Image (tube, rainbow, N blue to C red):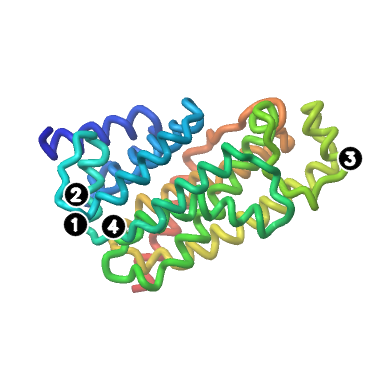
Amino acid sequence: MKLETAHQICEKIIRENSRSFYAAFKDLPLKKRQAVFSIYAFCRKVDDAIDLHQDLDELNTFEDYLDQINTEIIFEDPVMLALQDSVKRYHIDLKPFYEMIEGQRMDVNFTQPKDDKELLDYCYHVASTVGLMLLPVLAEKNQSHLRECSIHLGYAMQITNILRDVGEDYAMGRIYLPQEDMSSQIVEAIKTKKVNSEFIVLWEKWSHRAEIYYEMASDQLYLFDEDSRLPLCQSLVYYKAILNAVRKANTDCLSKRQSVSDFISLKREIDERLRKANHHE
């Protein structure tokens, strides 16, 4: 298979599975765009191995692929072929890829996090790792200074996912909010899909935590390559807006998934954050 075709397949995967992510990153320069899409496609395939197939053997296969990625082997799998090109071009560390696969194993052998530390450890494995994969592509000059920023943004986005999907996750037998935060009233709210004041207090605790991480990451946007700031800013602002969408729905993330609708105000926020980042230089 031609390398160009492999990259096109990765682009198709992201376009069909995440229109918002695709829209944010599609205007990057060609090589950066290809790298971002190949990383996304790999993560998508690993995620599907568990969410769709519940196949731990498939995870082992992906680890075997990673073991070979810095060799001269020519992969038949188009996603691995494209990812190999990106890893070599941008000298991407493979450790976050292995850690992300370990995060998928956490979902297979799911146990509710006991405390804040365990929840953030999970967020690191399934989300912050992706930021670390992308870092050499989006911050070629300053990546050594942005590791913590990437981890924080991963925390923020995964906490947002959790806060948006409490009801859906419970339907699959999972509660990601820590055991130490649970009370009988909160458990009852989740089980009955009826928001109560105790649940709102807990939800706001973690929403506030996520918003702090978003702001910490936003403060570092200026260190990313200039051509990478807009897509990062769009992703940050859009994800952060999910929290407000849930708030406006009376914190009902139990009976339905809330979505963002006020794109005009988001455009203003993106422009303002981007202006500050560019002005910082």
Q: CA distance from mark 1 to mark 2?
A: 6 Å
Q: CA distance from mark 1 to mark 4?
A: 9 Å
Look at label 2 and name its amino acid.
Asp
Disc 4 crowd rating (10 Å Cα; few below 14, some 14-19, many 20+) is many
In percent of width and height, residue 192 lies at 81, 26
- In contact (CB < 8 Å): disc 1 and disc 2: yes
In percent of width and height, residue 107 lies at 58, 39
Is residue 29 visible in the rendered image? The answer is no
Residue matched to label 4:
137
Look at label 4 and name its amino acid.
Val
Q: Secondary structure at mark 2?
A: helix
Image point 33% across, 45% down: which residue? Answer: 64
Disc 1 crowd rating (10 Å Cα; few below 14, some 14-19, many 20+) is some
Which disc is residue 89 wearing? 1
- In contact (CB < 8 Å): disc 3 and disc 4: no
Q: Secondary structure at mark 3?
A: helix
Disc 2 crowd rating (10 Å Cα; few below 14, some 14-19, many 20+) is many
Residue matched to label 2:
85
Q: Earlier in the sequence, mark 1 or mark 4?
A: 1
Q: CA distance from mark 2 to mark 4?
A: 12 Å
